[in-house]
Amino acid sequence: VRVGYAGQNGHPYYAVGRELVRRGLMTKDEVSMQSLRAWLKAHPDQAADLMFTNKSYVFFRTLDGEGPIGGEGVALTPGRSLAIDRARLPY
């Protein structure tokens, strides 16, 4: 199944690693993707509560046809398409 970005709910992102540090369960230096995954796996009874501290959600939609879809809504071309920051450079 191919998926593409469909939107988000508008809430600011809140890092779950920051929440583990705030709760005193990890130090800032201990936080990594690997340590977060290990903590969630080791504490399944607390995982949902931790994940719900981040109120930001990203939504996806299924895609038909070619490519991943770029910001202009057209399929990206391998080896040719570029990522740009629309706040700094218009299409």
Image: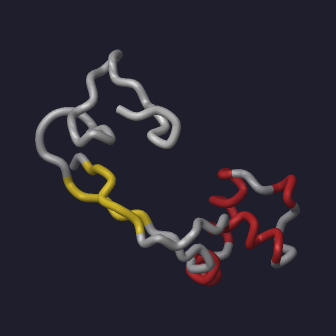
Residue 46 screen position, x and y as percent = 64, 82
How many numbered circles does the render carry?
0
The structure's colour scheme is secondary structure
Query: Above or below — where is 62 with respect to 51?
Result: above
Residue 7: name its quadrant: bottom left
Residue 21 screen position, x and y as percent = 82, 69
The residue drawn where x is 27% and y is 37% is: 68
Residue 83 screen position, x and y as percent = 43, 31
Residue 77 screen position, x and y as percent = 26, 23
The residue drawn where x is 52% and y is 36% is: 88
Looking at the picture, tell me which residue is in the foreground, 56 or 21: 56
Q: Residue furthest top?
A: 79
Residue 16 shown left or right of residue 58 in the figure:
right
Residue 49: name its quadrant: bottom right
Residue 33 shown left or right of residue 2 in the figure:
right
Looking at the picture, tell me which residue is in the foreground, 31 or 84: 84
The residue drawn where x is 22% and y is 33% is: 75
Residue 28: name its quadrant: bottom right
Looking at the picture, tell me which residue is in the foreground, 3 or 69: 69
From the image, which quarter does the C terminus lie in?
Answer: top left
Query: Above or below — where is 88 with respect to 15?
Result: above
Looking at the picture, tell me which residue is in the foreground, 91 or 6: 91
